[in-house]
Amino acid sequence: MYGKPDLIVATGIEEPEKPFFFLQEYKKSLNPSGNPEYQVIAAMITAMTLNNAKIIRGSYVIGRIWYFVILEKDEENYKYYVSESFDALKINDLKQIFINLKAIKFFIMKNF
């Protein structure tokens, strides 16, 4: 695997010390070039391994549809959970996307 992050948010003054992990993958639509669910899970496993984390959160977006993902690791196994879909063009779903993002931010800041 390889890649370059678009953005990193971390503690530290001149050098990043501990990044806040919330990984996201976006595709305009489903196509043969890759499934964003599998791509974000692969990135999440890599981030967990490199940072010795037990849990990480992320999302993937296909067009206007959002999904939130939680990946956990016990001694040997990975388990992941995918939320129901949220349509960003529906006001109630859009509000829930915002609530979910705020909750993730709160969780990360509380446990940092």
Image (cartoon, helix red, strand yellow):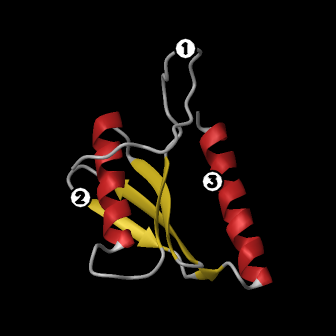
Q: Which residue is mark 1?
A: 14
Q: Nearer the viewer, residue 64 or 108?
A: 64
98 lies left or right of 12: right
Q: Which residue is mark 2?
A: 77
Quadrant (top left, top right, bottom left, bottom right) of the C terminus: top right
Q: CA distance from mark 1 to mark 2?
A: 36 Å
**Sequence order check: which comes first, mark 3 or mark 2?**
2
**Sequence order check: which comes first, mark 1 or mark 2?**
1
Q: Residues within 10 Å of mark 2 (few under 14, many from 20)?
A: few
Question: Amino acid type of disc 3?
Answer: Ile
Q: Nearer the viewer, residue 30 or 18?
A: 30
Label 3 vs label 2, nearer the camera: 3
Q: Which residue is at a point 30% across and 36% down the rendered structure image?
A: 50
Task: Report helix, strand or loop for mark 1.
Answer: loop
Query: Where is residue 88 drawn, in percent x and y?
Result: 68, 78
Q: CA distance from mark 1 to mark 3?
A: 25 Å
- The quadrant in which residue 11 appears is top right
Q: Which residue is at a point 23% across and 58% down the rendered structure image?
A: 77
Label 1 vs label 3, nearer the camera: 1
Q: On screen, 3 above or below 42?
A: above
Q: Nearer the viewer, residue 32 or 21?
A: 32
Label 1 vs label 2, nearer the camera: 1
Q: Residues within 10 Å of mark 3 (few under 14, many from 20)?
A: some
Q: Which residue is mark 3?
A: 104
Task: Report helix, strand or loop for mark 3.
Answer: helix
Q: On screen, 92 above or below 54?
A: below
